[in-house]
Image (cartoon, grey):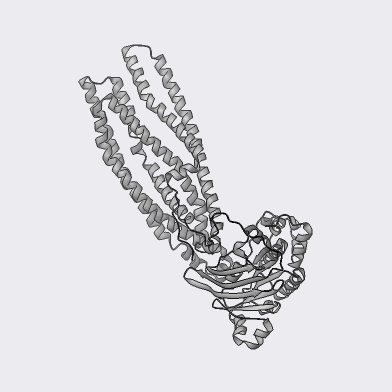
Amino acid sequence: MSPPPTDVDLGWWALVRLAPVSTVASVLWVVLANGATLLLPAVSAAALDQAIAGRAVGGALAALAGLLVLRTLAEAYGGLARVSAATRVSATLRYRLVRHVFALGVPGTRRHVTGDLVTRLSSNTTTAGAAVPALVTATVAAAASLGGLVALWLIDWRLGVTFLIGALPATLLLRLLMNRATSSYAAYLERLAAIAARLTDALTGRRTIRASGTQRREMARVLAPLPELSRAGQKTWAVQRAVSWQVDLVITGLRLAVLAVAGLGVAAGRLSPGDILAAAMYLTSALAFLSQVDTLIRLSDARANTSRVAALLAERPQDPAVGAAPRQHRAIPAGPGALSFRGVRVRLGDQLVLDGIDLDVPGGAAVALVGRSGAGKTTLSLLAGRLLTPDSGTVLLDGVPTADLCPDALRREVSYAFDRPVLLGGTVREALTYGRPEASDQQVWEAARAAQAVEFIRRLPGGIDTALADAPLSGGELQRLGLARAVAHGGRLLVLDDATSSLDTVTEAEVTHALTVALVGRTRLIVAHRASTAARADLVAWLDAGRIRAVAPHHVLWEREAAYRSVFAADPPPQEGDG
């Protein structure tokens, strides 16, 4: 079983540490801007008092202009620093997420649909990155509020006391806003991710949807979470609306109260006209934090998004070797590619997929894996190259447990061709040499010839150097390129997971014959749905409900076992055509 998830620290301080330089620069620029803002009232008050007294105000006005210029420049550079911090945090989170998704492997990614992963990698990390500039803004606003309060207190302690009495309820309202908004945003993001996941599924099966005429039904399915999404969004806005007007009301009352006390001070002779001007300006600074409703809403949104990122990062890989301390790996010995399974058990979630598998694949032989849907064929094939790790038991390549082998060396010796290959790279050539960029032109063309792909590759606009985006490929052509990539990869073991299902019978026979010639001495493990594919293998391993039922040549099983024959009748392969 997989180890339980562990907590991942993505609190505010952890996010700041992802972009320390940009964050510090942002803080310094914002502090400089706020410092200039705090000095403006004192300079303005001095200029006013000097003007009333009939003294020269040239120096005060020059200082005032200098402070305004300084604040403008600091705000501009602070904005650039905040953007830099947000971008760096988002990029770092995406990098960590991508690495972690690959570390989770096949069993880990099965827990999340593609749309959900895309949402976490894109919008969730972007919003999480925005937390840092929002946090800087809120923190500096709090510092500015404290500075404004101190200045009010220095002008007249009565002003400070009046401000504190009114600020307390507003602060409690802001805390309530943060808690309620975060909860609402979390619900909103869950519904949004559900829609994204359903949309991704629909796009993947768009041809089937169109062919079956179920567009309206599929639209209804994709948008089914929309009412809940709307309710979650409206709840968020309702919380913001309710708190915003209450905070604005408190701020307005607080402003009037402080200015009224200042006015009484002027009437009593305690304060000068310049003092009341300074008090009015310092009051704006003191109210800065209470005016940060929008910033706190952004922080609530960022906290909800960060929680989704942290939840994925907290999931532990099924392979215990991933993330463990480096250890000494054994070298892969020379050998023919003999593959062995000893007492292998695999559980995916609550389902026991493979139960006590014992199987020997002779070196250089072709062994077909046959069984009904859900029998465990693909799972067994994934174990061969350690794309999946058994819960118990051992997988051996030429007598050495694959768990003891260097992962990179194992990848060089085991290649895969899947039923729905994804071509990676910029051009067809790059796709065929993906994983083995040092392959020569001769090796690439020999692999393409073995997969019966030479003819249609040469028909492409730029031949083998055609950009993948400009290469119109049918399902069968895509599969043949996937086969060619696996052949070009080399190694002693080739795993074909239903890799010819989109080929017509004639093309499949030609490909199988060519592969037999090209792969002499290379071990092949073949997930087979067609009787013709199984017939061309040296041996068939018949799986039934996660167990090996029999191992024998196809013709022997075909003649003796009616249940074996029924496998091909009950579980025909998918047909896409070679079109």
Specify whether residue 461 is in view: no
Q: Position of residue 178 (x, y in %)?
A: 35, 47
**View extreme (left): residue:** 268
Question: Left of 295 or right of it: where is 176?
Answer: left
Against 6, residue 166 (above or below) is: above
Question: Left of 251 or right of it: where is 114?
Answer: right
**View extreme (right): residue:** 442
Front residue (pair 294, 186)? 186
Q: Position of residue 188 (x, y in %)?
A: 41, 55
Front residue (pair 409, 510)? 409
**View extreme (top): residue:** 55
Residue at image x 46%, y 32%?
28
Question: Left of 490 or right of it: where is 82?
Answer: left
Against 321, residue 88 (above or below) is: above
Q: How many marks?
A: 0
Q: Position of residue 490 (x, y in %)?
A: 72, 62
Front residue (pair 510, 57)? 510
Front residue (pair 463, 520)? 520
Specify whether residue 342 is in view: yes
The quarter in which the C terminus is drawn is: bottom right
Q: Position of residue 343 (x, y in %)?
A: 56, 73
Residue 414 quadrant: bottom right
